[in-house]
Image (tube, grey):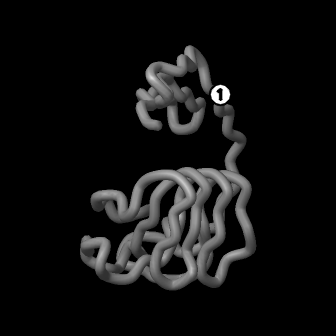
Amino acid sequence: SYRACPMLFPGFNLECPDNNKARWGFCANCPSNSCQSESSDADAAVGIGLKGQSSPPVGAGWTSYFASGGGTCSATSETHRDVWLWVENINVVNGGVNGQLYSGYGGGVTLTIQGS
């Protein structure tokens, strides 16, 4: 099991404390830790393209410390998942990008993309 806390550093190409990284995802703490702010430590990464403390690289899923069991903090829960990711409806508008990003991970998520 894992602790239900707000995501730490959610986004793309993120680097969290204690050598936790994700191409797309977020960082989290051990189930035994209380919910913490982004200025604190991080113990695991969840998402796509992961590197975590005490964990080998994970293509998609979560690194070793994310879901080690209620009240625990051990590097035992590294999990790999199949993920589908695609971008659709991309338009360049006044030099910026508008579109949607879809994911089949965790039941599916749709994000609106806007930027320059």
Say left or right for 57 vs 68: right
Q: Residue at x 53, y 75 (%)?
A: 65
Tag 1 secondary structure: strand
- Residue 34 location, x and y as percent? 25, 76
For disc 1, the marked residue is 86
For the N terminus, the quadrant is bottom left
Q: Residue at x 57, y 19 (%)?
A: 90
Instruction: Give the tally of numbered discs.
Output: 1
- Residue 23 location, x and y as percent? 61, 56
Name the residue nearer the viewer: 32 or 45: 45
Q: Residue at x 53, y 65 (%)?
A: 45
Say left or right for 69 vs 5: right
- 62 shown above or below 43: above
- Residue 4 location, x and y as percent? 31, 58
Name the residue nearer the viewer: 84 or 76: 84
Badge 1 crowding class, 10 Å Cα cut-off, few under 14, some 14 to 19, many 20 or more, is few
- 28 shown above or below 110: below
Say left or right for 20 vs 96: right
Q: Residue at x 60, y 18 (%)?
A: 88
Name the residue nearer the viewer: 3 or 11: 11
Say left or right for 35 vs 97: left
Mark 1: which amino acid? Trp
Q: Residue furthest front?
A: 94
- Residue 33 location, x and y as percent? 32, 79
- 54 shown above or below 28: below
- 28 shown above or below 116: below
